[in-house]
Amino acid sequence: MLADQTQTQAVTLTPAAARAVKELLEKRNLEGYALRVFVQGGGCSGFQYGMALEGNIREQDQTFEEEGVKVVIDEISIDYLRGSTIDYVEDLMGSGFKIDNPNAVAACGCGSSFRTKDSAGDQGAGGCGCH
């Protein structure tokens, strides 16, 4: 598969999240970059979310465009993120991205880490990463 091929959309970006990403890209002058969304081991629930502004899209990455933002997800993370919605929230506690993941059966209090049905027996290392 070629990196510039668009795959079936795996996650949804809300308009607020898309605006936030566009503002970051513009502020940092990162034309042609994408939002990379990924999952890695860690956090108090077993997995944690990660996001980065990415200029290096690999051949095995799945890419799609949502609300005018190119989104990139690696081949392992896609299974954990399928069906998720990424939002950008602003409240009294601050602002940031929030992921609503239908695959998560348990999550950290702040939502930065999660556990899936398949990993329900696993315990994450360390304490909660909530700040």
Image (cartoon, grey):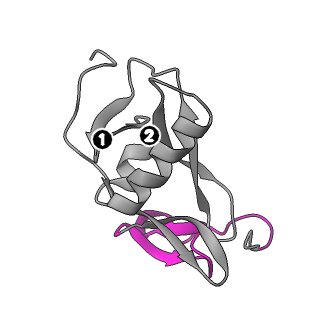
Residue 45 or 69: which is nearer the viewer? 69
Is residue 40 found left or right of 125 in the rendered image?
left
Give the x, y percent position of residue 101. 39, 67
* 61 is higher (above) or lower (below) than 22: above
Residue 76, disc: 2
Q: What residue is rendered at 47% in x and 40% in y? A: 35
Does 41 appear in magenta? Answer: no
Magenta stretch, residue numbers: 102-127
Amino acid of disc 1:
Gly
**Residue to which mark 1 is pinned:** 68
Give the x, y percent position of residue 88. 48, 64
* 108 is higher (above) or lower (below) than 4: below
| Helix, strand or loop for disc 1 | loop
| Residue 59 picture quarter | top left
Is residue 97 found left or right of 117 in the rendered image?
right
Q: Is residue 84 visible?
A: no
Q: What residue is rendered at 66% in x and 69% in y? A: 123
Is residue 44 found left or right of 83 in the rendered image?
right
Amino acid of disc 2:
Ile
Q: Is residue 81 visible?
A: yes
Residue 14 or 119: which is nearer the viewer? 14
Farthest right residue in view: 126
